[in-house]
Amino acid sequence: MSLLHNGQQFPSLVVPAVGGGTISLPGDLAGSYGVVLIYRGSWCPYCNAQLASFSRAAPMLAGLGAKVVALSVDDEAAAAGLAAKHKLAFPVGHSADARAAAAATGAYVNDDPRYLQSTGFVLAPDGSVLTAVYSSGAIGRLTADDVAGFIRYTKSHAA
């Protein structure tokens, strides 16, 4: 497992999307600031709160030129239920291979049961990592307000 560092290109990662099709990263976020939220599962109360917060912040983030995607190892039914419950306004991926996603992104893996720990990335429009937040347990994750402030700061200090 190798952590992603600021300035590195986000690796290629493809997962099935709730409702059909796939989420293909970083390509689906190209040209926009991207927010990639890897969440533990629909059962996690902290993840539910985080995803609901990002959904509520969707208009503000869109106004800043940011797109959000989320993904987990949940099966499609669990991910679809979570998306419907919180009226998620962004693509949600399901059935991610925990080992492959961890190898690509550096996310921590819980082994029994197997799932990915909360991990978040903010990407530049060119797909490079602006910041990465890794959690090895239930807490410690990106917040919508922090991401919005970070994008505002990044835009105001662009060379």
Image (cartoon, helix red, strand yellow):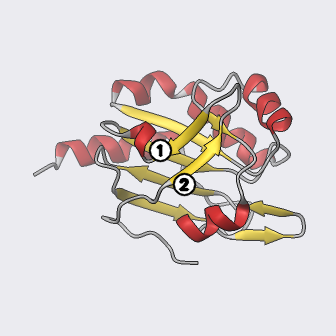
Labels 2 and 1: the sequence-earlier one: 1
Point 35% across, 61% down: residue: 9
Query: Which image quarter holds the N terminus?
Result: bottom right
At label 1, the amino acid type is Val
Point 44% across, 37% down: residue: 28
Give the labeled residue for mark 2: 120
The quadrant where residue 110 appears: bottom right
Q: CB under 8 Å between callouts 2 and 1?
A: yes
Position of 102 relative to 46 (above/below): below
Q: Nearer the viewer, residue 129 or 18?
A: 18
Q: Nearer the viewer, residue 92 or 145?
A: 92
Outermost residue toward the left in this view: 159
The quadrant where residue 120 appears: bottom right
Query: Which SS class for mark 1?
Result: strand
Q: Is residue 106 visible?
A: no
Judge from the rendering whether residue 79 lies leftward or rightward of residue 64; answer left or right: right
Q: Position of residue 51 (x, y in %)?
A: 65, 38
At label 2, the amino acid type is Gly
Decide: few, some or many residues near mark 1? Use Cα within 10 Å; few <14, some 14-19, many ≥20.
Answer: many
Outermost residue toward the bottom in this view: 1
Point 77% across, 36% down: residue: 79
Give the labeled residue for mark 1: 35
Point 33% across, 30% down: residue: 64
Q: Position of residue 114 (x, y in %)?
A: 83, 64
Judge from the rendering whether residue 153 lies leftward or rightward of residue 75; answer left or right: left
Judge from the rendering whether residue 15 lies leftward or rightward of residue 6; answer left or right: right
Judge from the rendering whether residue 49 lies leftward or rightward of residue 111; answer left or right: left
- Report how far apart the C-alphas of labels 2 and 1 lie in the structure: 7 Å
